[in-house]
Image: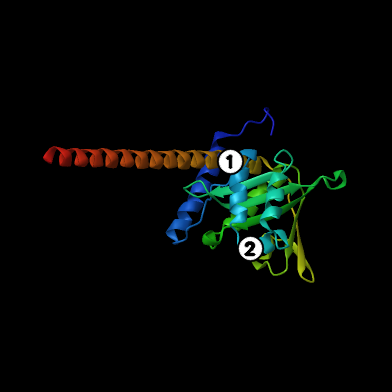
Amino acid sequence: MTSEHPPAPGLLLRLWRRLFSAADAGRRKGRSFGWVPIRPLSPRHKPRIQAHLTALSSTDRYLRFGYPATDEHIWRYVAGLNFERDEIFGVFNRRLQLVAVAHLAFSVDPQWSTCAEFGVSVAANQRGRGLGAKLFERAVMHARNQGVNMLFIHALSENVAMLKIARHAGARVERDGSESEAYLTLPQATLDSQISGVVQDQMAQIDYQFKLQAKQFRAWLGLMQEVREGVREARHHGDNADGH
């Protein structure tokens, strides 16, 4: 996107309405998902990423990494995340805990510079909200905008949820015993996809700030409650002392 072609206000308005109308439609149908605030993560989020991954069950770790990952494996994985080369996306709950994380890894081989790999994990208590599919859609958009034309997913054949997401997006899935590989050809980026990515990032940032302020306010309320209880107890003890 160049300065010679600034985004038209009408296009920004249409994209904004599209995101919120999807969320409203999901609520009217009784679903808890529609628009999901997906935020790009940075190195400062490593402790939260590690907490999310280590909280996964042994089965979920196996499906995410393709092997029975121990805590030590996860620590090494998080320590090795390259935020300058790759893109890591996350979904936060209202307590600012990561409940879903996606890793879009770009190829380090110049021969495959237009290829990227996708991996995702979702907390057990957040299943059924479509977070994995939403993260995949966001990763596809970002990959397109970065010039990627082939998205690759390596998953265990028993990872039905991940393979379903890939197939639904139109990926070609090839099975080889206990493992499967999915290939999704991506269209070129458009002005719409580029602006959509910017708008979604900005909206997710606003959502994160709201949650941060709400968390700080709840902490302040808790502190005030403790102060009030302390004053009340001190006054009660003082009254008892005067009575004696």
Q: Nearer the viewer, residue 178 or 59?
A: 59
Give the residue type that dot 1 points to: Asp
Dot 2: element: helix
Q: Is residue 130 left or right of residue 166?
A: left
Q: Identify the residue at horizontal 76%, vertical 70% (top origin).
A: 178
Q: Identify the residue at horizontal 29%, vertical 40% (top origin).
A: 230
Q: Is residue 97 left or right of residue 143?
A: left
Quick check: marks 1 and 2 in contact, CB under 8 Å? no
Which residue is at the far left?
243
Vertical side of 205 occupied by 136: above or below:
below
Q: Residue under label 2, please give it.
A: 60
Vertical side of 7 occupied by 29: above or below:
below
Dot 1: element: helix
Q: Nearer the viewer, residue 209 or 244?
A: 244
- The numbered dot on residue 178 is none
Can you see residue 126? yes
How many C-alpha atoms fall within 10 Å of the one at disc 2: few (<14), some, or many (≥20)?
some
Q: Nearer the viewer, residue 128 or 172?
A: 128
Q: Which colour scheme is used?
A: rainbow
Which residue is at the far right?
111
Q: Which of marks 1 and 2 is nearer the N terminus?
A: 2
Q: Identify the residue at horizontal 61%, vertical 34% (top origin).
A: 7
Q: Residue under label 1, please give it.
A: 201
| The N terminus - image quarter | top right
Q: Identify the residue at horizontal 48%, vertical 50% (top origin).
A: 21
| The C terminus - image quarter | top left
Q: Position of residue 217 (x, y in %)?
A: 39, 39
Q: Position of residue 110 (x, y in %)?
A: 86, 43
Vertical side of 127 occupied by 103: above or below:
above
Give the residue type that dot 2 points to: Asp
How many C-alpha atoms fall within 10 Å of the one at disc 1: few (<14), some, or many (≥20)?
some
